[in-house]
C-alpha cells in the first residue's frame, strides 16, 4: 500500500499525525453509523412491538447498548492497529528511499579518496602516539621524517631532502615531525610548514604549505602554499627567507 498525500508525487509521504487523524475520523464515523442504525432499529421495531412490556424494552435497549459499546471498542482497536501498520509502512518506505538515494550518490561520488583516508589514518596514529605520552626525542622525530622522505618516489624525494636541509639551516628553531604522514616543521609543537609530495594525493605538483601560525602576514592578502615543480638555487633562497620569516 502506498501512503501518499492526494496529488503528491511518489516521494511525498504522509506525516504520522495525518495518518492517525484519518483513521480516528473513520473510527468515529463507523461508531456513529452503528449508533444511528441501532437507534433506528430500537424506535422502529423494538419499542412498537413491546409497548405493553417495559421489561422487554429495557432488555432490548441494554443488549443494543452493549453491542454498540463492543462495536465501538472493536472499531477503536482496529483503528489503532491500522495506524501502527500504516506508520510502519511509511517508515519502511522512507528507509527504502533513503537507501536508494545513498546508493546512487555513492556510485557517483566518494566522501574521501583512498589517499585521503590513508592520510587520516596516519594522523590518527600520530595523535594516538602523542596521547600515550611518547617521550620520543627530537632526533627520533627527525629520523621518522627522514624515513618518510626516503620512501618517496623521485622527484619528490630529492625536493624533500633539499627542503629539509634548507628549513633546518634557515629556521633552526623549527622541529621536524610527521603531520598526516608528511614531513612538517613545528614551533612549540604547532606545525608551521610542511611538504606535501605530488604522490601523496596524486597531484600534478608537490606543495610547500604554511599553517596559520606562520608569520607570513603581508597587508590584507598573502600566499600560504607554493607549488613546486622543481627546486632551483633561487627557489631555495626564497624558501629559506620565507621559512625564516614564518618562524619569527
Image: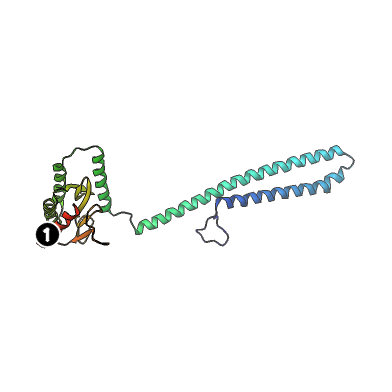
User: In the figure, 70 relative to 185: above or below?
Assistant: above
Farthest right residue in view: 52
**In-image side of 195 versus 100 (left or right):** left
Farthest left residue in view: 233
At 70% across and 47% down in the image, what residue appears? Answer: 31
**In-image side of 228 versus 56 (left or right):** left
At 28% across and 50% down in the image, what residue appears? Answer: 117
Quadrant placement of the N terminus = bottom right
- In this picture the colour scheme is rainbow
At 70% across and 41% down in the image, what residue appears? Answer: 70
**Observer-nearest of 228 and 221:** 221
User: In the figure, 140 relative to 10: above or below?
Assistant: above
Using the rendered view, name the quadrant where residue 75 is placed. Answer: top right
**Observer-nearest of 74 and 120:** 120
User: At which x and y percent is residue 180?
Assistant: 23, 49
**In-image side of 80 versus 126 (left or right):** right
User: At which x and y percent is residue 211?
Assistant: 24, 53
Callout 1: few (<14), some (14-19), or many (20+) C-alpha neighbours within 10 Å?
Answer: few
Using the rendered view, name the quadrant where residue 53 is placed. Answer: top right
At 15% across and 42% down in the image, what residue appears? Answer: 140
Disc 1 on helix, strand or loop?
helix
* Residue with the mark numbered 1: 237
Amino acid at each position: 500500500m502506498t501512503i501518499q498525500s492526494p496529488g503528491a508525487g511518489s516521494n511525498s509521504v504522509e506525516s504520522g499525525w495525518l495518518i492517525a487523524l484519518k483513521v480516528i475520523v473513520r473510527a468515529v464515523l463507523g461508531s456513529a453509523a452503528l449508533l444511528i442504525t441501532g437507534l433506528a432499529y430500537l424506535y422502529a421495531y423494538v419499542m412498537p412491538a413491546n409497548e405493553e412490556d417495559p421489561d422487554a424494552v429495557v432488555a432490548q435497549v441494554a443488549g443494543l447498548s452493549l453491542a454498540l459499546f463492543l462495536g465501538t471498542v472493536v472499531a477503536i482497536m482496529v483503528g489503532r492497529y491500522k495506524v501502527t501498520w500504516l506508520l510502519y509502512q511509511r517508515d519502511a518506505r522512507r528507509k527504502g528511499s533513503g537507501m536508494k538515494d545513498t546508493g546512487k550518490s555513492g556510485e557517483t561520488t566518494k566522501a574521501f579518496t583512498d589517499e585521503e583516508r590513508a592520510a587520516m589514518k596516519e594522523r590518527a596514529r600520530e595523535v594516538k602516539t602523542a596521547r600515550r605520552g611518547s617521550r620520543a626525542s627530537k632526533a627520533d622525530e627527525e629520523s621518522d621524517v627522514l624515513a618518510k622522505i626516503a620512501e618517496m618516489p623521485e622527484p619528490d624525494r630529492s625536493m624533500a631532502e633539499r627542503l629539509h636541509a634548507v628549513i633546518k639551516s634557515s629556521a633552526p628553531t623549527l622541529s621536524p615531525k610527521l603531520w598526516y604522514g608528511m614531513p612538517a616543521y613545528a614551533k612549540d609543537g604547532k606545525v608551521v610548514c610542511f611538504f606535501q609530495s605530488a604522490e601523496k594525493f596524486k597531484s600534478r605538483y608537490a606543495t610547500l604549505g604554511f599553517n596559520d601560525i606562520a608569520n607570513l602576514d603581508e597587508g590584507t592578502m598573502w600566499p600560504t602554499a607554493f607549488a613546486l615543480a622543481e627546486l632551483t638555487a633561487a627557489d631555495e633562497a626564497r624558501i629559506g627567507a620565507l621559512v625564516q620569516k614564518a618562524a619569527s
